Amino acid sequence: MIKVLVVEDSPVAAEFLVHILNSDPEITVMGTARNGVEAIELVNRDKPDVVTMDIIMPRMDGLEATRRIMETKPVPIVVVSASLVREEVDKTFLALEAGAVAALEKPRASGLGTRDSEAEKLIEVVKLMSQVKVIRRWKKAEPAPKTEPTRDVTPVPRLLSRDIKVVAVGASTGGPAVLNSILSSLSRDFPVPILVVQHIAPGFAGGFVDWLNRASPLAVHLAQDGEIARPGCVYVAPDGRQMRIGANFAIALTDEGSETGLRPSVAYLFRSVAESFGAQAVGILLTGMGRDGADDLKLMREKGAVTIAQDKESSVVYGMPGEAAKIGAARYSLPPDKITDLLRGLIK
């Protein structure tokens, strides 16, 4: 049985979340907290398997509570947030940076007798996150304990630099923090454009772009239909639109569906990159649920592109990259820091 602590200051919203979670036979809500102070006390006392965390709360908000929990008694934290308030969106991504493993839009009530897609998504994520091994985060003023150096078992492949024209990246659950890590480690003069599809709750894409911009030396944009992708820039697919790129570097946003049932979908982007750039592209599939992008990463590889999947050890959810590895779509399986090193060495 998965024990969940619900942290939510609204009694009505808390009751609804408890109802959703308790409707699944594998989950039990072991308690509720009205603010971050209560959340920390209950985490220490009751040791839940997962915490669902509201962001805007009295006494102590969800961001500070996440920081303190991850610095003392780390546990998988799923941010369950409204996306309409700018402050809430900003703090949601800061909570992910502080160690939260996923962020979801707060489900809207549709009658207590029904379970809609938002409720199903919450249950699915809570179940998956209960299996995630989280580590303690150290305060900035507190150094992490020294450990014996270990042998690097994931060497960076030695590749000759190539005439790469574009990098395409797909990610889902756990992806924001990994993307932030990769993009913040690239130089401002990175010589090709990067296109990103990140599965994210509606209303969060703009805040996601702002958050990436604060950490990355690259210019991160919410993609616009018809704009030309330029070197040193990152283009993130907006809510509810498919994103593709042509051989002339023009970005197109459409309302087309996808065989994955997702919009935006990684598959749609990867397929356009394979068609337009062939061997002059890099495809990267990061942590996430499902198999979106795996088949089209394989298509990219068949066209001669360099294809990379995040390795199992560093993935929050080894769904998408695992499917890619299973079908031979990824030429390399690497942790985020090695992906960055490979990009630096490959694209000069």
Image (cartoon, grey):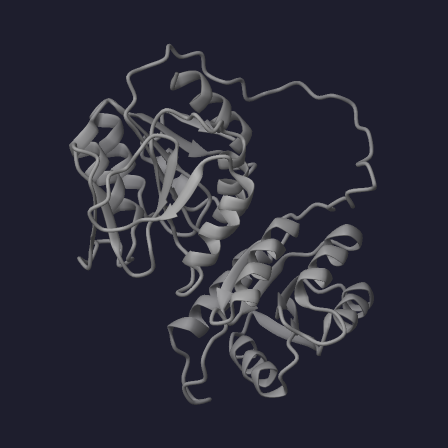
- Tell me, yes or no, if residue 181 can be seen here: yes
Residue at 23% x, 22% y: name it: 279
Task: State whether residue 17 is above or below residue 172.
Answer: below
Task: State whether residue 87 is above or below residue 307.
Answer: below
Residue 319 relative to residue 128: left or right: left
Where is residue 145 drawn, in percent x and y?
Answer: 82, 34
Where is residue 166 drawn, in percent x and y?
Answer: 30, 30
- Which of 137 and 206 lies nearest the eye of the viewer? 206
- Which of 228 and 340 lies nearest the eye of the viewer? 228
Residue at 56% x, 36% y: name it: 313
The quarter of the picture where the C terminus appears is top left
Where is residue 326 drawn, in percent x and y?
Answer: 36, 36
Query: So how many labels did they put on this image?
Result: 0
Q: Quadrant of residue 325?
A: top left
Task: State whether residue 49 is above or below residue 107.
Answer: above
- Tell me, yes or no, if residue 131 can be seen here: no
Residue 310 relative to residue 9: left or right: left
Residue at 72% x, 61% y: name it: 64
Where is residue 10 drawn, in percent x and y?
Answer: 62, 83
Residue at 62% x, 74% y: name it: 28
Q: Quadrant of residue 54?
A: bottom right
Residue 34 relative to residue 88: left or right: right
Q: Quadrant of residue 345?
A: top left
The quarter of the picture where the N terminus appears is bottom right
